[in-house]
Amino acid sequence: MLKDKVYIVTGGSKGFGLATAKSLVGRGARVGLLSRNEAGLQQAVAEIGSDHALGVASNVAHREDISAAFEQVKAHFGRLDGLINNAGMARPGPVEHLIEAEVLMQVQTNFLGTVFCCQAAIPLLRGGENPRIINISSASAWHYDEMGHLSIYAATKAAVERFSRDLYVELQPDGIGVTCLRPGGAWTSFAEDWDAQALQAGIDAWHDRGKYMSTGMEPEQVGDAVAYALSQPAGVAVDLLEIRPNMQTPKLR
């Protein structure tokens, strides 16, 4: 179903994005990887193979960057069949002490970045063969047993879910399928650049909600879920897909 198709994956240099790209390429697709991390992009393309992947350094919060990057991917591969809006970031902190710049970064990357990427993709997808948009949310948008002190991150992902529902209806006349994928916790490098004290405070608050956590998935399982949504036949779309660990894992300290 995905052979020879071309998908753009934002945040494609690591984590869910890289796992998704590898899952799609493993099914015969080709991918355009977008990320602010040029070194990470080079490594990702090297892992996947330059015949199947193109890396484009860009910032999803900058509309001009995105439009140029999408056009570059389509020109390189000669087509575009879908978009996976995966780019995201979080900065933990109690509401009282949130830093304005970090709040804005999360809103601009997680929500506005999703909006801007959809705006750039729609005209390039319209008229294609079974085109798709997959917007990556988070279990934090809905569940209260996720990591503590992530109120802004969770709110931006809730906004992505509501936006996706309207987009699902809006793009039906164009035959563009829209899916919102809500993954739970997985072992990735997502928190590697968080402030250590803020991270520990979030973990402490998290422990107040119980001693077990819903985490432990591998990124590859999220990538396979994306491939499943993309593989639906024309006229059928997975509206909302949640994938979470089904195990009790003791919380980290």
Image: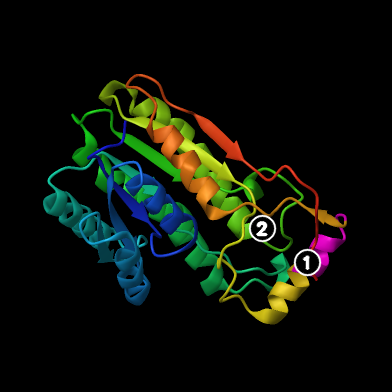
Q: Position of residue 142 (x, y in %)?
A: 67, 43
Q: Which residue, given by chain and number where applicable, does mark 1 sit on?
A: 252
The quadrant in which residue 179 appears is top left
Locate residue 29, reporting x and y percent: 28, 44
| Left or right of residue 220: residue 146 | right
Name the side, left or right, on which 56 lies relative to 141.
Answer: left
Tag 2's secondary structure?
Answer: helix
Residue type highlighted by circle 1: Leu
Q: Is residue 208 magenta?
A: yes
Looking at the image, residue 81 lies above or below residue 20: above
Q: Is residue 197 left or right of residue 183?
A: right
Spatial separation of the CA atoms under disc 1 and disc 2:
20 Å
Mark 1 or mark 2, which is nearer to you? 1
Tell me the residue at 29%/42% (across/down).
Answer: 28
- Residue placed under numbered mark 2 in the picture: 151
Name the residue: 56% across, 76% down: 193
User: In this view of the protein, which residue sits in the foreground, 88 or 108?
Assistant: 88
Against 175, residue 206 (above or below) is: below
Span highlighted in magenta in the image: 203-210
